[in-house]
Amino acid sequence: MRTDSYRKTVTAGLLKAVNSMYLVKILAGEYYNIFRKRHLYRTIRISDSEEAEIQDMWTKYYGRRISTRWHRLYQSYSGRFNVKYFPEMLFTTKLERKLNNREIGRMISDKSFLGMYYRDIEGVRLPDTYLINNSGVFYTSDRKIISKEKAYAALEDIGAAVIKPTLDSSSGDSVALYDFRDGADRRTGRKLAEVLASYGEDFIVQEKIVPSESLKVLYGGSINTLRVITYLVDDRVFHAPITLSMGRGGSHVDNIQAGGISVAVSDDGELGSEGLTFFGEVHRFHPDTGTSFANHRLPNIQKLIRVACEMHEKTPHMRMVSWDFTLDENDDIVLLEFNIFGQSVWFPQMVSGRAVFGEHTEQMIRMMR
């Protein structure tokens, strides 16, 4: 008869195998990403003294030398050398797994739970929710279970709405805009039932945010998202360089990996002078509106930083969180979503030319040992 000890050993072995397969998948993805950007970094040369500075730091705190391809890649965008750039490969495969508890993370990362976690934070709001689907069960915004028929009826004439999956979504490519009238989407002509059926289970239907004028003047076709990364060192929450992502070319998706433009944002709300795309295009003016990035200022950024840090304190077991915010038509701060797995540290560094962890880089490197 098989003992509990045997079963635990088998279970542990299976979990290890699954984690190994997951890690191999991540590694393959990161190698592919750096390979397809080789035309950007292969012409970048760093001096012998810069190379030595990088390797000295990593050897001291990590115990080994590292590839400088990621340093050169970030430099190819911003034009700035920074010894403390953090390689995406090491963050994704090692550091993120140390920072955040994966088991608990799976439980709390459902995007439909945000209202339950952060509704008491002063100075931030969430988009109004029209409908929630969790594991095939429909809920109202106040978590009352309703029938499928009532769920459909609630959306028949809701007008403009955003639908997005609440699990395993990223890069903004899973977010879609609709305009429901008389049980059909006026944008595509698709019936409401067909649209909802295409999402299967685990999705949320929310209001379409009307962006702040300070964002619309840059590009009015997308929400335009402020990414604020917060991380915990010892007993204090800090934030990484802030970025603003916006759409272009008529697209409603603002994510840089989906064709958008990203620009650095100072802690005082002033935009950097250059917006960058995934493949290194440089724009001093938005190509659709002609609005200059230089000297453009966004309101309430100091308040935004405070809000993000307070929300991190209400997110236990997670030492790093990537928050996506926007500013609505009243310049109020709106939390769109958060990410605790599959986060990225490459685009804040490439856009700003600053290290994602700044003065805490050495501590983050040590954590991987």
Image: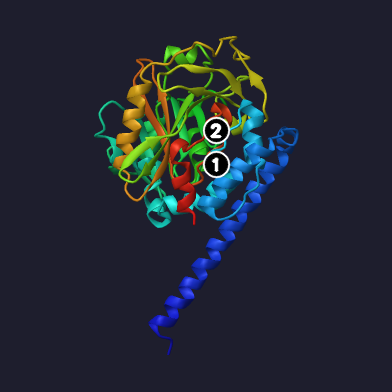
Kind of residue at badge 2 = Gln
| Number of marks in the rendered image | 2
State the residue in front, 296 or 210.
296
Residue contact at pointers 2 and 1, CB within 8 angstroms:
yes
Kind of residue at badge 1 = Phe
Q: Is residue 321 visible?
A: yes
Dot 2 lies on which element?
helix
Q: Position of residue 200 (x, y in %)?
A: 49, 46
State the residue in front, 363 or 299.
363
Q: Residue at x 41, y 43 (%)?
A: 320
Q: Position of residue 280 (x, y in %)?
A: 67, 27
Residue, disc 2: 349
State the residue in front, 310 or 127.
310
Q: Residue at x 59, y 21 (%)?
A: 275
Q: Label 1 crowding class (10 Å Cα cut-off): few <14, some 14-19, many 20+?
A: many
User: Where, by quadrant of the figure, is residue 129 drawn?
Assistant: top left
Residue, disc 1: 86
- Please tell me whether residue 4 is drawn above or below residue 210 in the rendered image: below
Dot 1 lies on which element?
loop
State the separation of the CA atoms marked 2 and 1. Answer: 8 Å
State the residue in front, 151 or 342.
342
